[in-house]
Image (cartoon, helix red, strand yellow):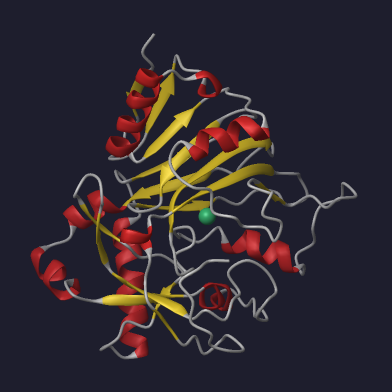
Amino acid sequence: MEPTITPIDATLGAVVTGVRLAQMDASTWKAVEQGFHEHAVLVFPGQNLTEAEQIAFANRFGDIELLAPDPAQKAVAISNQKPDGSVMSAGEHRFKSLRGNEGWHTDSSYMPLAAKASVLSAQVVPSAGGETEWADMRAAYEALDEAMRQRIAGLSAHHSLYHSQAQIGHVVETGAGYGFHAKGAPLRPLVKVHPVTGRPALFIGRHAYGIPGLGEAESEQLLSDLVDFTCRPPRTYAHRWRPGDVVIWDNRCVLHRARPYDYQEVRVMRHTRVAGDRATELAPTHRDDRAAAYEPSTSNR
Ligand SMILES: [Fe+2]
């Protein structure tokens, strides 16, 4: 049985039914992979995958990007719940990282090797809010006028998690978690050509700063103007989660953000990240003034 792929009423995204992600044959997988390239965000309601099944599904798209110090841990919890069951308070380091996720971004653009794709599954959802929202950077590029396309052609931006967290008042020490490294800030073109579809897409978001050749203020203004202009309908879709839902998206051409909720309620998501391809997602790094040191590396580990 072939999966049913129903496009969402936006320039990106489709809902996929009639498939068990844990038991796909070759032709089903081919349809899912084609849908991924066409729609960039695929929503699979009610899959209820085990952790091992989620990792195996993500692994079909490529190597897993390891986010935790333990290399055996290939999925991580994105959660405001502490081990004792209580919720995090506003001043906690990890809570500030969760709040950071509420700004438009693409995963691991601040690492030497940016991510290819991300998988999220809902475990515990709040009674309201807590959606994940995506914005289509392919359609965003198409929506730019010719003058803007010419202005950004050839421009690149640095990407840094120190930078994006500092924007929300979160100053983090080197070594305090994934992304707070001394490898330097990758320099990435503002326009990324998708390695499979060939479609150009804006590659921007909250981690981006410091466009070489522009002053600091001019760079910030351009980058925030681009996000403001592009992250709006019909290029956006927000998913209201139910436990068991699974979504995969293409970080190479989509921005995403978490939506707020009542932080006294628990929200637990399970996340698996698919590593980028070195041929197309690896970028040279430059000194990041917010890091304690600069030790260039082409490895995320
Ligand atoms: Fe993210």
Task: Pinpoint residue 283: horizontal percent, then vertical percent.
Answer: 37, 71
Q: In what quadrant of the picture does the N terminus appear?
A: top left
The x, y position of residue 238, in whole percent, is 46, 41
Depicted 58 relative to depicted 6: above or below: below
Residue at the image point whose x is 33% and y is 24% from the top: 31
- The residue lying toward the viewer, choosing from 93 and 168, is 93
Answer with the quarter of the image where residue 175 lies: bottom right
Say which residue appears at 15% left-offset and 75% top-offset. 151
Q: Would residue 241 be visible to someone looking at this image?
A: no
Residue 7 lies in quadrant: top left
Residue 77 location in percent, x, y?
Answer: 69, 47
Q: Is residue 268 left or right of residue 235?
A: right
Q: Give the quadrant of the C terminus.
A: bottom right
x and y percentages locating residue 257 in the rendered image? 50, 53
Judging depth in this view, the residue of 11 and 197 nearest the camera is 197
Q: Is residue 261 left or right of residue 162?
A: right
The quadrant where residue 225 appears: bottom left
Residue most extreme to the top: 1
* Residue 20 visible in the current orientation: yes
- Name of the residue lying farthest toward the left: 146
Quick check: 83 above or below 11?
below
Count all numbered tags in the image, as a single digit.
0
| Residue 202 in the figure: left or right of residue 198 | right
**Extreme-right residue of the structure:** 84
Give the residue displayed 81% in from the left and 52% down from the top. 87
Which residue is depicted at the point 27% across and 36% down?
38
Residue nearest the observer in this picture, 113 or 155: 113
Figure check: 84 above or below 215: above
